[in-house]
Image (cartoon, rainbow, N blue to C red):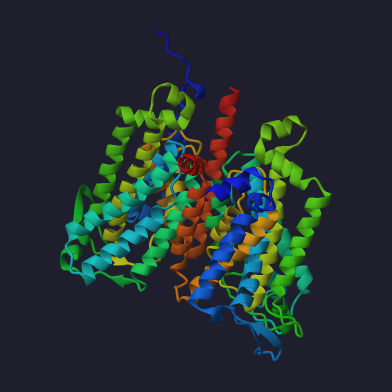
Amino acid sequence: MKKKKFSLKDLTDTNLLLTITIVVFFLMYIGAILFQGGGFTKPQTFFNILNANAALIILSCGLSLVMITGGIDISVGGVTALISMCCAVYLDFHGGNVSTSLLMALGIGLAFGIFQGFLVAYLDIQPFIITLAGMFFARGLTTIVNTKPFNVANEAFTKLKLTRVIVPGMGAPNRRGVYVDAYVELGVVVAILVVIVMFCFLRWTKLGRSFYAVGGNHQSALMLGINVKRTRFISHVLCGLLAGIGGFVYFLHVGSGSAAHATGAEMDAIASSIIGGTMLTGGVGNIVGTFFGVLSLGTIQNIVSSAGLDEAWWSGITRAVMLCLFLVIQSVVMARKKKA
Amino acid sequence: MSKDRKTSTGSGILTKIVRNQCFIPLIALLLLVAFNLIADPGFFKITLADNSAGNPVLSGFLVTILDSGSELAILAIGMTLVTAASGGQDISVGAAVAIAGSVLLRVLCGSNSRPETLQAPIIVAFLVSCLVAMLFGAFNGVLVAYFNIQPMIATLILYTAGRSIAAWVNNNELPVISEPSFKYFGEFIPGIPIPTPFFIAVACMIVIGLVLKFTDLRLYTEAVGINQDSARLNGLDPKVVKVLSFVILGVCVAVVGLIKVSRISTINYSVIAKDIEMDAILAVALGGNALSGGKFNMAASIIGAYVIQFLTTTLYKFHVQSDALPAYKAVVVIILVVLSAPKVREWLAGLSKRSMKKEAV
């Protein structure tokens, strides 16, 4: 067999954007090691990025699902805040147990997903408007549940929060020369499980493939006999469920309830999905790319803070620049492909 | 039901009123007024009293609505055009107001954050901030028109970065202006008991009214919004029209920035014009304009803006916390959007037809 010469055209849209993302992430990380040195060579720095962004990974997976079907959901940040507040109030003021609070988190996420999904899929309402309202509703409700931010003191919960999973063989000696194991939090394990499950779901199940079909061209999907409305509905429900899981993981990471939690998480999640190569127009995307998208954002944040810039406003600007860059790249790449 | 039928078949004045787009916001306004009348007639009390500067000014809930609603009305003008032309909304207006206000203060204060005297005339500062806001508007517009990104996603960029940019313009300092005449724009001009923002809003309305009357802006915007391909085939450039609508929104943003900053003589980057994008979109939706673009009614949007402010003030009066406000407004949005969805309308129409048939039987 003759070997074919490799060209851009041979890659599918999904793989092309995925490749760009992974290359950019590794270039950035190598750049960080070269210019910032020190911290970035330690594996624990990488694991800390994972620890801080576990919830975001799960939220972004949900958003990728919705975006692949051509929709959008910007309520996930608000839902996350609502979940952490509700769980915190339940655990501390009503003496609840952890497993019930987990169920509560999933229930809140699902409720938002089902409601928004129904309005979007069956009533044909623009997803952006409905989920914008959902975001404001969740944020407002958080304040109604409890105004003041507070830390959770529940024993069982703090025990769970402090659980560390040790990564074998990745430890490094600390300043005093004592060997310290590298660790990740429980949330990271959940996040990686979610990534694997969602990757398999999108790749190898019938429903997963129909997500791409609906996002690519919903009319042709309809001709193929796919239930477009149901597919859209399920994508929103799944996104809601993942927002529930992500919300609980977030809560597990911060261990407090506050109306200001997860501010802008929806923007980060959308940005991660876009950076990870999910097309806004639908039909193109990959969960692995989303995973790397989150890591890229986390790395940027780490670079900005270790460069000693005033994080509060620099991270906002850098993230926006990155989002803008990738949006333009997508737009240009797709336009060129169309011409070719 | 039979009464409805008569009015819909006859060419009565009532039909015309019901068909008018201003009908929905006006009904909402009437409902709110009735609710307040029943709950507490004191809501409508207006008193004339001296303010801290010693000028006789009007105060009361209605004046507050007129005052704060004016900002919203100005934004609603620009938002209506953007919605009509691009079929999407600009969610970065709040952040853009922060930038415009920050630039305004930067020019007025120079390098010193607490100057004794203004470093530049207010009009120059305003023009500079106007220019900056127009540039950011053009940036959004270019992303939407030339890169074909959905408006809400394209403006997400500025939404994320806007407040950071605003803080960066002033090196994260909070300049304070001590010049009393600067307060005229956001509060009262001595001797006039009506808040100045209302006059500014009226001026903006007159300008946009004249522009819509004497130029082809309305025709072009609607043509692009309804079908941009056929607009292009008719010799219009949809890209230019879209960018233009975002630039006009930029001007509106700069005006609101001036009012907002003038009100408190300083700026708070994370709080200024917070959640105003939601209100502006809501005003457009309440005005009965299709959020997916096309035909628009400017007057209905402006009335919508004042109605939204009426709702906000009513909620405040009942001691709803400002952070909890979005929850109530979100419910209103969801109800509005669901009611205006074509599917629901069809269903409702079918329902009324069926009940009419029953009556006939």
Residue lying farthest to the top in this orientation: A1
Give x and y (percent) for residue A187: 26, 52
Q: Residue furthest right?
A: B214
Above-or-below relation of A292 to A268: above
Q: Is residue B5 visible?
A: yes
Q: Is residue A313 left or right of residue B179?
A: left
Q: Nearer the viewer, residue A259 or B38?
A: B38
Q: What residue is at 62 percent from the left and 49 percent from the top? A: B289
Q: Residue at x 25, y 43 (%)?
A: A193
Is residue A276 visible in the rendered structure shown here?
Answer: no
Q: Is residue B81 above or below residue A141?
A: above
User: Could you tell me residue B300's position as x and y percent?
Assistant: 66, 56
Between B197 and A62, the one nearer to me in the picture: B197
Left or right of A121? Residue B51 is right
The image quadrant of residue A200 is: top left
Location of residue A203 with respect to B72 vertically, above or below: above
Q: From the viewer's perspective, is B112 left or right of B155?
A: right
Q: Residue at x 27, y 66 (%)?
A: A88
Which residue reaches farthest front?
B361
What x and y, as percent, mark residue B258? 68, 69
Tag count in the figure? 0
Q: Position of residue B302 (x, y in %)?
A: 66, 60
Q: Image point 28% across, 71% down: which residue?
A: A151
